[in-house]
Each structure stands twice: as structure tokens, then as C-alpha cells.
Image: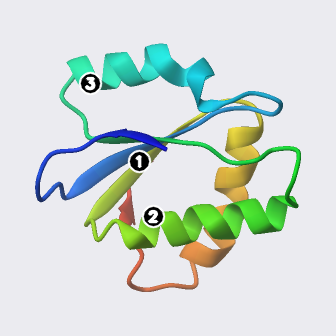
Amino acid sequence: MTSHLTANATHKVFVLHGWANTKLIMTKVCKDLDRAGFDYINYHYPSFKEELDSLGKNLYLEVKKQKIDSVSFVTFSMGGLVFRNMLKYAYQDDDFPNMKI
């Protein structure tokens, strides 16, 4: 996981790559987010090794670990499916950060 974070960030952007890729494919997006002043996490997940439900739950748990007030997501291809799967966990959790969609 690559990130650009400032101390006490209250909002973060999670960047999710697509199927059969690595987080490196999202480097340009991350550079643009950095230039715009966003705190981000270039989130890597093993698209070949885990079921979609497991990937969504792992993303949910990673977001929860951040202790932030709000979160946004930038997705590509399968990253969007991982995000959608994460929603079933997030919508059941009243303490999940506010999503800026």
C-alpha cells in the first residue's frame, strides 16, 4: 500500500486498481491527487488470489483502521467491484466514515 498522508487527516481517498494489475497502474492518478492536495492510499489487493467477498471485506477493514471522518474512492475496472462489495459491510456499520461519492 502506497500512501500520501498528512498528520491527523480526516478525509482520505482510496485508489483501487483493476483486475490483473498492481497499484502501479494508478501512479498517475495518485500523482494528480497529490498535486491537488489530497491524502490518499494506493490500495493493492490480490485480484487473482481471493474471492470478491473477501477483497471487499479486507477493503472495509482497511478503511476502518484509518480512523478518519470521511472517505472517497477512485476505482478502475475490478476495483469498482471490490468497492461495491465493500459497501455491504460499510452500510451495516454506523461508525464507518462518511463516503464522499
Would you call the spot at circle 1 few (<14 residues within 10 Å), some (14-19), or many (20 or more)? some
* Count of residue discs: 3
- Counting from the top left corner in percent of width and height, residue 17 is at 65, 33
Residue under numbered circle 3:
34
- Residue at the farthest left position: 7
Q: Which colour scheme is used?
A: rainbow
How many neighbours does mark 3 have within 10 angstroms: few (below 14), some (14-19), or many (20 or more)? some
> CA–CA distance between discs 2 and 1?
10 Å
Q: Which amino acid does label 3 sit on?
A: Asp
**Numbered disc 2: secondary structure:** helix
Give the mark nearest the N terminus, 2 or 1: 2
Residue drawn at the location 68% of the way across and 48% of the way down: 45
Q: Is mark 3 on a helix, strand or loop?
A: helix
Residue at the image point whose x is 74% and y is 27% from the top: 21
Q: Could you tell me which residue is drawn at 26 percent across and 40 percent down?
A: 39
Crowd around label 2: few <14 · some 14–19 · many ≥20 (10 Å): many
What label does residue 72 carry, if any? 1
Q: Is residue 27 visible in the rendered structure shown here?
A: yes
**Residue labelled with disc 2:** 63
Report which quarter residue 10 is drawn in. Answer: bottom left
CA gap between label 1 and label 3 equals 14 Å
Checking the image for residue 84, the label placed there is none
Of the numbered discs 3 and 2, the one sitting upstream in the chain is 3
